[in-house]
Image (cartoon, rainbow, N blue to C red):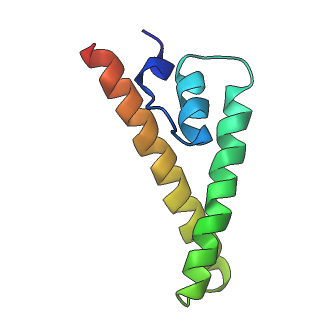
């Protein structure tokens, strides 16, 4: 069963990109990377407003965004194995 079958209506684009990556669709790795980077920017803004600066800001934003991408992917993989 394709991973995209587990996506709820109205889910963010990153959910579809990650599902496509799991299903090995062409171009999906680039979409996941771009969306992870975009999410890191928004996380970084929040961290900046919270007082984090410099290299720590970049590292924390990327790690947080990559962690979210990994958690979403793990959820799709887990659901696929239980179906």
* Residue drawn 55% across the image and 16% down it: 23
Q: Where, by quadrant of the figure, is residue 83 drawn?
A: top left
**Vertical order, 51 against 62 (above or below):** below
Q: Indicate the quadrant containing the N terminus: top left, top right, bottom left or bottom right.
A: top left
Q: Residue at 43% across / 32% down in the picture? A: 8
Q: Residue at x 38, y 35 (%)?
A: 74
Q: Position of residue 64 (x, y in %)?
A: 50, 61
Q: Is residue 37 above or below residue 41?
A: above
Q: Identify the residue at the far bottom of this view.
A: 51
The total number of labels drawn is 0
Above or below, comparing residue 8 to residue 54 in the picture: above
At 56% from the left and 43% from the top, the residue drawn is: 12
In the image, farthest residue toward the left: 82
The spot of residue 21 in percent (x, y) is 59, 25
Residue 36: % across, % down: 63, 49
Residue 18 image offset from top left, x and y in percent: 55, 32
- Above or below residue 82? Residue 39 is below
Name the residue nearer the viewer: 24 or 38.
38
Q: Is residue 64 toward the left or the right of residue 58 in the image?
A: left
Most extreme residue toward the front is 9
Q: Is residue 24 left or right of residue 11?
A: right
């Amino acid at each position: 069963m394709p991973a995209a079958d587990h996506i709820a209506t109205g889910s963010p684009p990153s959910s579809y990109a990650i599902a496509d990556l799991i299903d090995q669709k062409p171009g999906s790795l680039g979409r996941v990377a771009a969306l992870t980077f975009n999410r890191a920017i928004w996380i970084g803004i929040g961290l900046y407003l919270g007082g984090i600066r410099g290299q720590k800001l970049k590292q924390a934003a990327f790690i947080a965004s990559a962690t979210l991408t990994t958690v979403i992917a793990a959820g799709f993989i887990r659901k696929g194995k239980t179906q």
